Amino acid sequence: MLFRLNISMVKFYFIGIDGGIGGFINKYVKDGLLPNISQLIEDGSMLRTIPSVPVDTPTNWATLMSGASSFTHGVISFTTHLPGETPQEGQYIRRTQYSSFSKAEFLWTSMERAGLKPAVVNYPVGWPPQISRGIVIGGLTPGGDLWRVFKPAIFSTVDPRFIGNWIKNVYPGYEKLQIHDGLNFSINVSKIKIEGKILPDNASVSFNIFKDKKDFILKEGEWSDWIYADADGELIVFRIKLIRLKLSENPEVTVYVSQAFKARGWAYPAGLEDTLLETSGPWVEGFDMPFISDTKRPYGPTNLSPELQLEHASIYAQWFEKALKVLSDKTGYDGLIMHYHLIDSLNHTYLALLDRENPAYDEKKAKHVDDVYSKAYSIIDKMIGNIIKERPRDSTVIITSDHGALPCWKYVSLEAALSRAGLMKYEVKNGEYYSVDMNRTYVFPYHDPVQIWVNLKDREKGGIVDKRDYDSVIEHTINTLYSIKDPDNGSRVIKLALRKETWSRGRAEERFGDILVFFNKGYCNWDGTTESLKFDLINKERLQQEVTEKHDVAGHHTTYLPADSEGYFENNAFTIFSGSRISHEKGLRSELRDVAPTISYLLNIPAPSYSDGKVIYEILK
């Protein structure tokens, strides 16, 4: 692939920090831990920015780049129900992460139309590419799985609890490793066979990728380089870490195999991957969010040690630093638009451990968690500093999150409450699971986002509610939601339930449920499993218990109002604008949909089509 010399001057750097919380930024800036972010704030303005509803990842990265509310762009969380589909269907379709799902234009398209070249890197809703002259690297949010070949795995001769999440006492699943002849073992993961041989003389292990004949030696605690291997004709890439090697009559060996991604297919223009592989290594989406399944919990907040997660995060941050330098030098771009996910993973895993209202609060654990957060934000600060260190003097830097998070420690089953009120009907599938009967169900909930749909005739397949009964069903449902009480203290769980038309309207409003639902702090609708985010098949406990204390998920955002905050816990986002054209203002409040129009104003180009945000003139010189 031929590249031109970099003759463009970068006009702006947009660096998205998923789940970043402004209160934490302020705390660590005050502690002197974030020198680069501190300087950006000093040279600009930090705003409290209000997300779109639902307060979720795809939704608000779409809001940031479209300059439009979710009622206009229609990217509604992760699992959107569309009229005309069966009620169950949309729960299992991952489409909102795709750029093509938006009903509003994105900034990179309006940039290109104005003759500017964008670089869109790891940006949710950034794939497939919508531009012809720019650069696109991946972008479906972790969990999109378009390029993942296998998930991470642990192989060990002993129970590897020592690399589990020791703060929360949750541990990864693993496969038992058998040592043969006192020295040899083999690992099979997907279609890759890895052979290992213990080398007692220098306390190391020799590894060989069987079919590809790749040899390398690791000592305890060492990572391999990136390993390129053939999986039935597909070139894939992953890494190995030798976690533990204890030599004895019965050696202890623990091997960690990272997730594997396809080596190609994730970059535009095609062929750009080869340059990045040679210079920076592979792009591996979600590398900073490791989770290893066990039989009980196939999905959820990380169950690996904070040390191992932060190792992943540092490796991932260094990839961005190297890759963006290569792209700048060899291809050039006028504006960088990128995303990094680490903090959102920490929020889901740890946030409630910092809240003194949490029944499980422990001062010692809180100090450990604060240490994890401070190191994580420091990794991000260092990454930002390295990315922008050669920026042109007149460029603008934008650092923003898509949302924050609030602590939670109680799981709420909407299905139990709606079933109690006769609004949903379930039939026994077996002794432990119940299946929804849509022929007798008047409303059904979606959980990503938290919304209630009426099973309306002529709109839903098999709908049973007449239009003349619509209002009464809505009223009954809202009253039922408000009746959900915490059995421990009698307090109301639902903070606000309202008809969607009382919130907003727009060209994508048909993608919203009939009732928007928001919880009080401490409660959420996700217990860390995929099952809890589905309504069609539920276990006995979910059908019988409306509120249950659970600590698997320690922080959430989708379930709360956009501006909810308490102390330095905030569900709203933060946005920093910094540069020679930005004034130094404090205490300003704006909306995430105002970011793209403000960038457009700085670029002297039209805002993206259908943008309904405004230019933040208060921060401009």
Image (cartoon, rainbow, N blue to C red):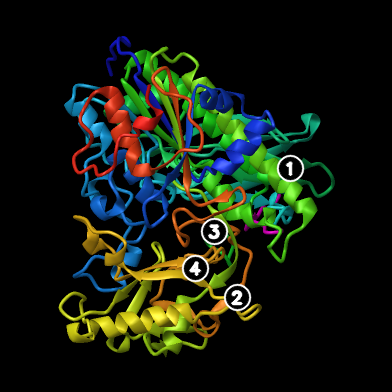
Residue furthest toward the left?
458
Q: Which residue is mark 4?
A: 525
Q: Which residue is mark 3?
A: 300
| Mark with earlier residue (1, 4) | 1
The quarter of the rendered structure image containing the N terminus is: top left
Bounds of the magenta segment: 169-184
Pick the residue in front: 573 or 441. 573
| Mark with earlier residue (3, 1) | 1
Residue at image location 40% in from the left, 75% down from the top: 535
Element on which disc 1 rests = strand
Vertical side of 370 occupied by 349: above or below: below
- Magenta highlight: main SS: loop
| Residue 161 coordinates in the image, percent (x, y) | 73, 54
| Mark with earlier residue (2, 3) | 3
Image quadrant assignment for residue 548:
bottom right
Q: Alpha-carbon distance for marks 4 and 3?
A: 13 Å
Q: Which mark is residue 548?
A: 2
The quarter of the rendered structure image containing the C terminus is: top left
* Badge 3: residue crowd in 10 Å (few <14, some 14–19, many ≥20): some
* Badge 1: residue crowd in 10 Å (few <14, some 14–19, many ≥20): many
Q: Which residue is mark 1?
A: 244
Residue furthest toward the right?
249
Left-right relation of 133 to 334: left
Q: Alpha-carbon distance for marks 2 and 3?
A: 17 Å
* Badge 2: residue crowd in 10 Å (few <14, some 14–19, many ≥20): some
Image quadrant assignment for residue 592:
top left
Residue at image location 44% in from the left, 78% down from the top: 481
